[in-house]
Amino acid sequence: MRAKWSELDMIALFSGRTGAVDTAGLIKGIGDDCAIFTGLDQRHWLVTTDILIEWIHFDRSWHPPYLLGRKSIAVNLSDIAAMGGTPHYALVSIALPEQIERDWVAQWSAGAADMLEEFGCTLIGGDTVKGKDLAFNIVILGSGAKEETILRSTAGAEENIYVSGGLGFAAAGLEICRNPGQFKSFAKNELEPLVNKHLDPMPRIHLGEILAASGMVSAMQDISDGIATDLAHICTQSGVGAVVEEVLLPGASALQGVCRTLNCEAVELQVSGGEDYELLFTVKQGKDEDLLALLRAQGEEQVYRVGRTVGGDGVRLLSGGKAVDIAFQGFQHKGESG
């Protein structure tokens, strides 16, 4: 059945699935001109937004609607994680072409609602319009303790740099989804972790909260555009440079077979591949052992040192004894510029 959507249809669809049920501070949610919520005393409000447009950020031919709904929320939650925050509320706006099937939208909304519920976030409003292209705009409102919120701009020189998981997996998964015929000879368990990383990324909210509360992390952001670009943002805003060591980058072994098929090196995906949504952070001098012990105690031991900050500027990859400039050489979605 083809959809002829109205705003009332979408309100009805989402009203039964507004995410988390803990709505302390929420006075009025979805269904009115504005949502109303009370202020915070000892915390900063954190607000982030991302837009996903078909043919630029996703392809319905191979991205299941339920997983796309989850991802649409997850990429915004990842921004909250990058500042060590806790998500609270969401606004969801959708541009819907008339040919989109009602069941497809219902599955998308179920995925979005499940991701919101998983991280204690409540849908409080949004908007729907008819559009030529399918697009989703998500706003997440979260909070962080005033003395704990972590910025990109506060890294110091001679600090170790860490990431929270394997790099390049989502980029490899994207290529597998685009060209599945190239990978028919691969075992399912070789491809699934890579494909899942692209289709259904998991925001690192819990880890971000621990890192912020520790007081031992100097700067942080999530890896959405590849470490080459995202680390360059930290360095530029903090007034430092960085050296990343190829031998320390996690996940190369899982990428080898796929990279042979793609005729590329694993390090290319690890450095420039986007959408891993892992956390990238610097640790204050002398605090590494204490932080790693804390993370082990909290069940978050899977973090990896990948390099260090240095005086000066730029981001360099140390590979085979040579240092190569990689600053801002990360992933761009098709159609993006700058």
Image: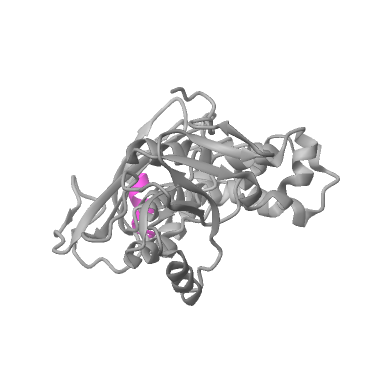
Colour scheme in the image? Answer: one colour
Residue 16 part of the magenta-drawn span? yes
Residue for point 19% across, 64% down: 25
Where does the image place residue 316, in percent across and percent down from the top left? 53, 36
Q: Residue furthest bottom?
A: 297
Where does the image place residue 251, in percent across and percent down from the top left? 66, 52
Residue for point 29% across, 69% down: 22
324 shown above or below 192: above
Left or right placement of residue 59 versus residue 290 in this view: right
Numbered circles on residues, count: 0
Q: Quadrant of residue 320?
A: top right
Which residue is nearer to you in this view: 82 or 267? 267
Taking the image as drawn, is residue 13 in sight? no
Residue 82 part of the magenta-drawn span? no
Which residue is nearer to you in this view: 88 or 14? 88
Q: Quadrant of residue 96?
A: top left
Which residue is nearer to you in this view: 130 or 191? 191
Which residue is nearer to you in this view: 26 or 173? 173
Left or right placement of residue 230 versus residue 123 in this view: right
Where does the image place residue 334, in percent across and percent down from the top left? 54, 26
Where does the image place residue 177, in percent across and percent down from the top left? 68, 40
Residue for point 46% across, 55% down: 203
Secondary structure mostly seen in magenta is: helix
Taking the image as drawn, is residue 103 in sight? yes
Q: Residue furthest right?
A: 185
- Range of magenta residues: 9-17
Quarter of the image with the C terminus in it: top left
Q: Quadrant of residue 142?
A: bottom left
Left or right placement of residue 247 versus residue 71 in this view: right
